Image (tube, rainbow, N blue to C red):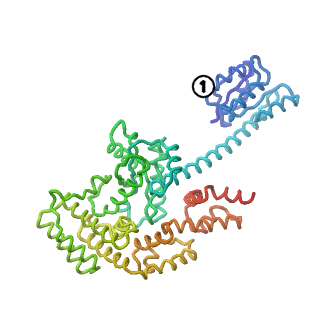
Amino acid sequence: MLRVLLVDDEPFILRGMEELIDWKNEGFEIAGTAANGEEALRCLQDNNIDLILADIKMPVMDGLEMLRKLRTSGKYRDVYFIILSGYADFKYAQEAIKYICTDYILKPVEKEKLIQALQKVRKMKNVELEKDRETRKLENAYLEAKLISIIQGRFDEPTLEYVRQHMHLSETVRYVEIMIDGEDFGEECEDTEKRINQKRLYKACADYLQDDSAHCVMDVSVQEKIYDVGFILCGYMYETSNEKEYLRSLMRYLREILGLPVIMIVGKEVKDLEETAKSYSTARMVRSFQGFREKKEIYYYEDEMQIHTHGIVLCKRSLDLLLNTIEQNDHVAIMKAVDGFYEEMRQRGISGETMRLNINYLLFQLIHLASELDDTVNQEEILRMISEGTFEVGILRGSKAHLCRVACEYGNYLAQMRKDSSRGILGKIEKEIRDRYADNLTLKELSEKYYLNGAYLGQLFRKKFGQSFKDYLNNYRIEQACQLLLRTDKKIYQIAELVGYRDLDYFVNRFISAKGCTPAKFRKQAKI
C-alpha cells in the first residue's frame, strides 16, 4: 500500500476526500491529514509518505510553497505530489509543473479524475521500484563478484576497500561452506534439481542472516558439480552466544526450512577479511578428506585436520609401503598394501581418532607426491575430486573399499602427470567448446572421451587458460550471447537456451558478472 497525506484547510473537504473513493481498492492508505503546508511538513518528519494531495491555497503555507520546499530540500524529492486547485489559471499549473508536480486536479474533485491520477502514481511507483530492484541486483552482483575474488585470493586493494565499505565485518573471520548433502539426497538427482536446491539454500541463508545477507554468496567453488553456498562468518554475529551454537542454530533453521540434509564445512579462523582465502583453502582441504571422515553435520578444520603424531600410534611402515605402490601405479599391489594397512591397525587395536590421524598422514603424503611432479597444481582439489568421484552410496566412510578406489585412481593420476602427451588434448577440448558450447558439456564427459583423469584435466586446463573449464565455457557462452543480442531480436530466455543455459536467472547473473549489466541493458545500450 502507498501511504497518502491529505492537506487542506477545510475539514469537510478532508472528510470528503477520505470518503470519495475506496482507497484500499486503489492500492493506497491514508496515513494522515494536515490543515496547511507547515503542518504537513512536520507530519512528513514522523511518517513515511509516498503521495501528498494538497490544496493550492491555504493559510500559513500554501500548496505551491510546500511543493517548492519539498523539491529543494533534497530529503523529500521522491514524494509524489498532486495539487488540488479551484484555479484554472495556467500560471498555477505551470508553477506546479516546474517543481515536478505529478498531477493538477481542479476542484470540485471528480471521482474518476482522482482515480486516474492515483493509477498514474502507481504506475510511476512501479517503474521506480523496478529500477530500484534492477539497481540493487546489479550492486549485489558486483559486491558478490568482489567478495568471491577475495575468497579465492585474487584481489587488489580497491576490491578489498569496496567490500569493507559495503559489508559489516569484524576482526575474526571464517569461511563456511554450506551445501546439500549429496550422498543422502541421492546421486541420481539431476543437475537442474541440484541447482534449484542450491538457490533455495542461498535464499534460506539470506533470510536467516537478514541485514547480513551479503555475507552469503553462490558458486564460490569454480569446480564442476559443486552446488555450494559460501558464508563469511564474523565474530560479531555470535556475540550473545558462541560460534558453535550460532552455526548449530543456523543449521537447524536450514534443515527445517528446506527439509533436506545440509552440511557445513568451517574453515580455519583468520584475523580479517584480507586473509579469507586462507580460511577458504582450509575448508576445501577438509572437503577433500571428507570421504574418510565419520559423518557429521558440521566439520571444523581444527577438529578434522590434526596431523600430530605425539603419543599416537602411526602405522608408518604399512603406510609407506602403500604410498610406494600408489606411486608405481600397481593396482594389485595397492590392494594388498591396503589390506596390510588395515590388518596392522586391527592388530594394534587402532580405531577412532588414531585411525583418522593415520589416514591424515596418508592423504598429506599423497598431496606431497603430486606436488613434487607439479607444484602449480592444486593438489587438495585433485584429492577431493578423486575421493568424491570414487565414493559410492553404501560404502562405509573410511572403509577399505573406498581407500582402494581412491588409491588406484590417484595412482592413475600420478602416472598421467608424468606424461606430456596429455597436454596436447587441450587443443581438442578447446575446439569441443567452440563446436558444442550450447550442449551440456562437462569436464567429466570430456575426460572420459579422451581417457584422462577429470580432476587432472581440469587443472591442466586452468594452467593453460588461466581459468577453470567451467569459467572458460561460461565466458565463451556469454560472448556468443552478446552476438545474438546484437544481431537478432530473439527474446532473452531464447538466447539463454541457445547458448546452453536452461536456468534464466543463472544466465542473467553470469551475464551481469561478465559484462556489468543485464542482457536487456546491454542490447539497449548497443542501439543508442
Residue 475 coordinates in the image, percent (x, y)? 56, 65
The part of the image, by quadrant, that contains residue 45 is: top right
Is 487 above or below relative to 166? below
Instruction: Residue 393: give x, y in percent of width and height.
Output: 32, 66
For label 1, the crowd category at 10 Å Cα-Cα, with few meaning under 14, some 14 to 19 and many 20 or more, is few
Could you tell me which quadrant the C terminus lies in?
Answer: bottom right
Q: Tell whether 205 sits left or right of 104.
A: left
State the count of labels.
1
Residue furthest to the top in view is: 59
Query: In what element is the residue under mark 1?
Result: helix
x, y (%) of residue 90? 88, 31
- Res 493 seen here: yes
**Side of 377 where 77 appears, left or right:** right
Residue at which label 1 appears:
46
> Splitting the image into 4 quarters, where does residue 405 fall?
bottom left
For this orientation, the residue located farthest to the right is 89
Residue at 47 percent of width and 61 percent of height = 193
Q: Which three-letter amino acid code belongs to the residue tagged 1?
A: Asp
Decide: is 449 above or below 386: below
The front one of 361 and 63 is: 361
Image side of residue 382 versus residue 524, left or right? left
Quadrant (top left/top right/bottom left/bottom right) for the N terminus: top right
The relative height of residue 508 versus residue 315 in the rendered view (above or below) is above
When asked about the image quadrant of residue 510, the answer is bottom right
